[in-house]
């Protein structure tokens, strides 16, 4: 850019009407930039929340799986105890019948 064209632009920029328009444009640009930054921050916050929700869902699923395993183990133990009790009852009934027969 030549010196004359630079001087012309500087002079033009200082014209009250043009300066007013340029200041309004600058203000609008700054407002748009601030809005873009807020949107970016909002998106980042939503992403963090989504990760937290996913982590919580995974934790709850692990907890449900663990409870299910615990219940299966407890049910298995109860079945074994019931079978043992049935065998003891049957053995005791045999003893009672033999004693009654003798």
Image (cartoon, rainbow, N blue to C red):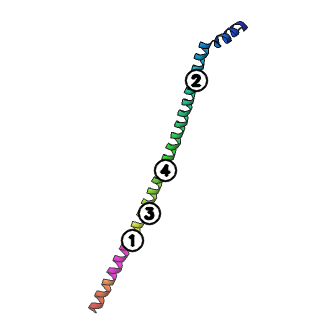
| Residue farthest front in this picture | 16
| Badge 1 or badge 3: first in the primary sequence | 3
| Residue farthest left in this picture | 101
Q: Position of residue 72 (x, y in %)?
A: 41, 63
- Range shown magenta: 82-91
| Badge 2 or badge 4: first in the primary sequence | 2
Which class describes the residues within 10 Å of circle 1: few (<14), some (14-19), or many (20+)? Answer: few
For image coordinates 43% across by 65% down, the residue present is 73
Please tell me whether residue 95 belongs to the stretch shown in magenta: no
For image coordinates 34% across by 82% down, the residue present is 91
| Badge 2 or badge 3: first in the primary sequence | 2
For image coordinates 46% across by 59% down, the residue present is 66
**C-alpha gap between disc 2 and disc 4:** 43 Å
Establish if 43 lies above or below 6: below
- Name the residue that disc number 4 marks: 56
- The mark closer to the camera, 2 or 3, is 2
Please tell me whether residue 87 belongs to the stretch shown in magenta: yes
- The mark closer to the camera, 1 or 3, is 3
- Name the residue that disc number 3 marks: 70
- The mark closer to the camera, 3 or 4, is 4
Q: Identify which residue, 74 or 79, lies in the foreground.
A: 74
Judge from the rendering whether residue 95 lies leftward or rightward of residue 21; answer left or right.
Answer: left
| Residue farthest bottom in this picture | 102
- Name the residue that disc number 2 marks: 27
| Badge 2 or badge 1: first in the primary sequence | 2
Q: Identify which residue, 20 or 86, lies in the foreground.
A: 20
In which quadrant of the rendered image does the N terminus lie?
A: top right
């Amino acid at each position: 850019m030549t010196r004359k064209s630079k001087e012309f632009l500087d002079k033009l920029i200082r014209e009250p009407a043009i300066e007013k328009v340029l200041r309004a444009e600058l203000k609008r640009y700054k407002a748009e930039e601030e809005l873009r930054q807020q949107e970016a921050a909002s998106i980042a916050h939503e992403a963090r929340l989504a990760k937290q929700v996913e982590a919580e869902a995974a934790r709850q699923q692990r907890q449900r799986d663990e409870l299910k395993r615990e219940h299966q183990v407890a049910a298995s133990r109860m079945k074994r105890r019931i079978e043992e009790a049935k065998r003891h009852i049957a053995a005791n009934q045999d003893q009672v019948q033999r004693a009654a027969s003798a």
